């Protein structure tokens, strides 16, 4: 049996309930892991609330969660990992659970905690993917909106490591941290475009929007070309001729997660954790994120 979080209707965090279900059985090429950490992503909250019902039509009960790290306890035929291996990855059957399946398990280095390993999966792949799609070059200037969030923090580090000049918009409480990561950070909000122009007199070559805060029109004006702007958070992208990166299967880059894991294990990539919660407190974790009582990546511990 497996203790699992699920919900049978859209709604507030209190729709999340804990129950016991049969542990999933791995098929060919799959492994089952005993989950040691499961990441909570912003998309989990949007799907649970019903805000993403058109993009993610529900078949209730829904078992939320995508990113997990743990120890293989059963392997299907042809699987890439063995019983006892420590692994991480994205699960197809709900990560807020004691047991989960992985189809592409990535080895977890001993230097990387289970919590950080689980937290890294989706936000890391998103940061890596969007930089690949925008394709900023060394010596160019990249503007990142909402850089204080997990995707933005990782994108700043990945970009600066490639010799790209990064200007970041963020809340006042994130300015110092982003500056420490190598970005030129300015406060978001009214007047942000003028502050960016002052911080980047050489101009802005490309823009990554992680905020969804209605910045696309001015971002296109800054670059002079909608093709140089990409968003992961603003559903009005098409109205501005801007690409929206949803991260579908066709967009995934198989090299992304192994590279990110190696960089994090080697101390070259940092992802702040906001807090850990017992699996049974998943509803409290969602509520704390929505009320901004916790910042940084939140991880459930089954």
Image: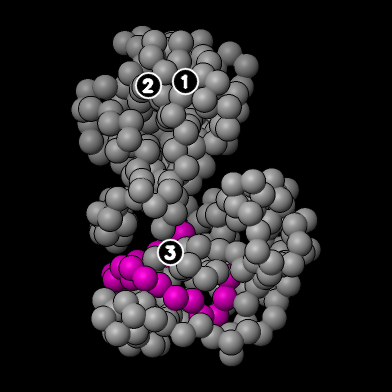
Q: Which mark identifies residue 79?
A: none
Left or right: where 206 falls relative to 60 = left
Alpha carbons under labels 3 and 2: distance apart: 30 Å
Q: Is residue 117 magenta?
A: yes
In the image, what residue occupies the spot 21% across and 28% down? 138
- Reply above or below: 96 against 237: below
Check disc 1: other Cα within 10 Å, few if <14, some if 14-19, many if 20+.
some
In the image, what residue occupies the spot 41% across and 58% down? 121
Whichever of labels 1 and 2 marks the residue nearer the N terminus, that label is 2
Find the magenta span and give its range: 96-120
Tally the numbered discs. Answer: 3
Q: Which residue is mark 1?
A: 241
- Reply above or below: 18 against 13: below
In the image, what residue occupies the spot 52% across and 71% down? 93
Image coords of residue 130 (percent x, y): 37, 38
Looking at the picture, the colour scheme in use is: one colour
Left or right: where 189 falls relative to 68 = right
Whichever of labels 1 and 3 marks the residue nearer the N terminus, that label is 3
- Reply above or below: 245 against 201: below
Alpha carbons under labels 1 and 2: distance apart: 7 Å
The C terminus - image quarter: bottom right
Q: Which residue is mark 2?
A: 227
The residue closer to the viewer here, 23 or 284, is 23
Q: Which mark identifies residue 90?
A: 3
Image coords of residue 273 (percent x, y): 50, 56
Alpha carbons under labels 1 and 3: distance apart: 31 Å
Secondary structure under tag 2 reads: helix
């Amino acid at each position: 049996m497996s203790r699992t979080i699920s919900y049978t209707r859209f709604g507030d965090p209190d729709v999340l309930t804990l129950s016991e279900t049969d542990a999933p059985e791995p098929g060919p090429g799959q492994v089952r892991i005993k989950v040691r950490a499961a990441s909570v992503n912003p998309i989990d909250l949007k799907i649970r609330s019903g805000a993403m019902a058109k993009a993610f039509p529900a078949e209730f009960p829904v078992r939320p969660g995508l990113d997990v790290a743990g120890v293989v306890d059963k392997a299907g035929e042809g699987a890439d990992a063995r019983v006892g291996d420590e692994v991480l990855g994205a699960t197809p059957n709900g990560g807020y659970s004691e047991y989960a399946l992985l189809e592409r398990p990535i080895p977890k280095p001993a230097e990387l905690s289970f919590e950080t390993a689980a937290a890294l999966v989706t936000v890391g792949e998103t940061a890596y993917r969007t930089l690949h799609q925008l394709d900023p070059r060394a010596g160019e200037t990249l503007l990142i909106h909402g850089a204080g969030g997990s995707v933005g923090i990782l994108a700043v580090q990945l970009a600066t490591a490639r010799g790209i000049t990064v200007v970041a918009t963020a809340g006042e409480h994130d300015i110092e941290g982003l500056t420490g990561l190598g970005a030129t950070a300015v406060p978001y909000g009214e007047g942000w475009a003028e502050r960016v122009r002052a911080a980047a007199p050489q101009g802005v070559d490309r823009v990554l929007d992680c905020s969804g805060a209605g910045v696309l029109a001015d971002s296109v004006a800054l670059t002079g070309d909608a093709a140089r702007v990409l968003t992961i958070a603003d559903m009005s992208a098409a109205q501005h001729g801007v690409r929206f990166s949803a991260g579908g299967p066709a967009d995934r880059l198989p090299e992304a997660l192994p590279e990110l894991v190696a960089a994090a294990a080697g101390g070259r990539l940092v992802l702040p954790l906001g807090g850990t919660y017992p699996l049974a407190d998943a509803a409290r974790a969602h509520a704390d994120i929505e009320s901004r009582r916790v910042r940084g990546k939140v991880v459930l511990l089954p």
